Image: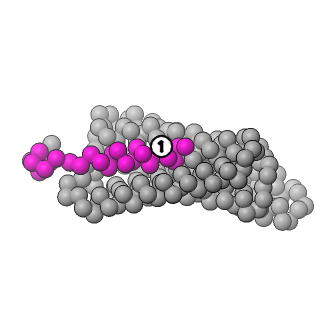
């Protein structure tokens, strides 16, 4: 620890807020899985995910407010900003996907939607654990292993999207093709955003270990 960090204690509030934000994203991913697996109470689950998205926005704004007023931060300001943005992006695409389901009046999911939603939930679970580990990095490899798993899941999601589109384009309903392709794309982009967050966490772990 340098003399500056010893004289002016680092503000640990950022780690609390990151963990809160990761928990909200995880809850949203779990709600998404429940929605597509049960096809029950879809409007209420869409609203619940929207409420979680609002909560995520609130936490993100609080992170940025602290960033603007805190002299000494436990991570580089750019790292804090990038991680907050990356986690919030996942939440935005989960919310965006479910809102599109509402707009398009999708009342029943298919196997491809369920598979992609599960990849999102598994990825977010890995990220949520990794976020707790940046509070005190003893060994970056623990975080790195979780980030590698997120990258693996994103590759599987790419394959799942390709399979979904191949099946979709075998059908003849043009309107349904447009709707479902949009939803598949949003689900897959959410896994891309998980990979982005994993990359930010990996960089933090390596730099601060």
Residue 183 found in image quarter: bottom right
Residue at image mark 1: 23
Residue 63 found in image quarter: bottom left
Could one spot residue 47 in this view of the protein? yes
Alpha-carbon neighbours of circle 1 within 10 Å: few (<14), some, or many (≥20)? many
The stretch in magenta equals 3-27
Q: How many marks?
A: 1
Residue 132 left/right relative to 105: left
Residue 18 left/right relative to 102: left
Q: Residue at x 36, y 37 (%)?
A: 133
Asked whether 24 falls inside the magenta stretch, the response is yes
The quadrant the N terminus occupies is: top left
Indicate the position of residue 171 as horizontal and vertical percent values.
Answer: 88, 57
Q: Main secondary structure of the magenta part?
A: helix
Q: Residue 34 versus residue 142: which sits nearer the camera?
A: 34
Residue 119 left/right relative to 65: right
């Amino acid at each position: 620890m340098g003399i500056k960090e010893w004289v002016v204690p680092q503000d640990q509030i950022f780690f609390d807020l990151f963990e809160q934000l990761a928990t909200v994203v995880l809850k949203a991913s779990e709600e998404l899985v429940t929605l597509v697996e049960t096809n029950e109470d879809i409007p209420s689950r869409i609203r619940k995910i929207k409420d979680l998205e609002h909560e995520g926005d609130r936490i993100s704004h609080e992170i940025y407010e602290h960033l603007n007023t805190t002299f000494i931060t436990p991570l580089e300001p750019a790292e804090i900003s990038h991680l907050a943005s990356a986690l919030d992006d996942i939440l935005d695409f989960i919310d965006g996907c479910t809102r599109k389901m509402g707009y398009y009046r999708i009342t029943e999911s298919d196997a491809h939607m369920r598979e992609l939603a599960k990849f999102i939930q598994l990825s977010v679970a890995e990220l949520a654990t990794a976020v707790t580990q940046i509070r005190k990095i003893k060994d970056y490899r623990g975080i790195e292993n979780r980030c590698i798993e997120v990258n693996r899941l994103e590759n599987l999601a790419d394959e799942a999207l390709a399979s979904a589109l191949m099946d979709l384009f075998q059908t003849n309903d043009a309107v349904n093709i447009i709707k479902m392709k949009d939803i598949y794309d949003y689900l897959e982009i959410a896994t891309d955003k998980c990979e982005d967050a994993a990359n930010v966490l990996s960089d933090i772990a390596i730099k601060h270990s």
